[in-house]
Amino acid sequence: MVTYEMIFERNRKWVADMKAKDANFFDKLARDQTPDYLYIGCSDSRVPANEIMGLEPGDVFVHRNVANLVNNTDLNVMSVINFAVKHLDVKHIVVCGHYDCGGVKAAMIPKDMGLLNPWLRTIRDVYRMHHEELDAIKDERLRYNRLVELNVKEQATNVIKTANVQKGYQKKGYPIVHGWVFDLHTGIVIDLNINFEGILKEIQKIYDLTGMASEHNEDGD
Ligand code: CO
């Protein structure tokens, strides 16, 4: 086990290592942040955003919660998206789930989970929306893992539903929203290649927050 004291020793060593690589590293770090990426992932300790993306401090703005959910009434994640798009001007937003996610598994257990009920219900809702596909998968682990992928897609869609993303994309051509899954067994990040433009066009039939709905109607969309 890493003791509490060891954390500080490791921190000092990390400072020395970073300075050895670049003497001005912390001067630059303190100046400002201009990350191109917003990462929304699971709180799971085995899925650290910077490490799996090979990025340094300053390269990625990070939000993590249980099972990487993007709930529209969650002031925390909505503030993160707002800040990242409007002020940091990020070019890409990634929702990254991971196979063997404990949050997704917990949502599939039919019992009262107390405070976690409303949180896990979002995942149960994803199951309900895709129950025919999921119920056809006989292997339990494969079924969970497919739910992990579908959950990523739904949460990425929730990101696309936000006014910040819709207006930003209309004005600047970004941010682009992506869905990824991290495989704990291999360390590989899998791009689910969600169709950002297609989902945007589809959801804007109902969730258009750009104020351009009339133009869309004239196009017969
Ligand atoms: Co997880």
Image (cartoon, helix red, strand yellow):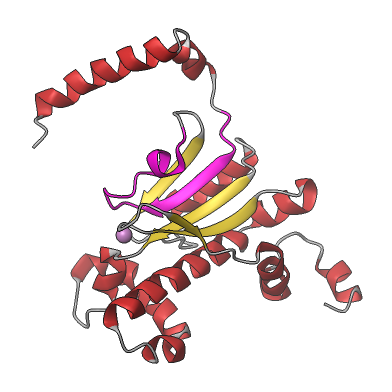
Q: Nearer the viewer, residue 114 or 45?
A: 45
Q: Residue furthest right?
A: 218
The image quadrant that residue 50 belongs to is: top left
Up the image or down, 197 lies above or below 139; here it is above
The image quadrant that residue 119 belongs to is: bottom left
Up the image or down, 115 lies above or below 205; here it is above
Q: Residue at horizontal 47%, vertical 9%? A: 24
Up the image or down, 125 lies above or below 7; here it is below
Q: Position of residue 33 (x, y in %)?
A: 54, 27
Magenta range: 34-55
Q: Is residue 167 left or right of residue 84?
A: right
Q: Position of residue 67 (x, y in %)?
A: 35, 61
Q: Position of residue 32 (x, y in %)?
A: 54, 21
Q: Nearer the viewer, residue 215 or 200?
A: 200
Q: Residue furthest top?
A: 23
Q: Nearer the viewer, residue 53 or 61?
A: 53
Q: Residue at horizontal 51%, vertical 70%? A: 154
Q: Is residue 85 left or right of residue 119?
A: right
Q: Residue furthest front?
A: 186
Q: Residue at horizontal 48%, vertical 19%? A: 29
* Quadrant of the drawing holding the C terminus: bottom right
Q: Residue at horizontal 55%, vertical 42%? A: 37
* Quadrant of the drawing holding the N terminus: top left
Up the image or down, 54 lies above or below 196; here it is above
Q: Is residue 176 within the magenta segment?
A: no
Q: Is residue 47 within the magenta segment?
A: yes
Q: Which quadrant contains ligand 1? A: bottom left
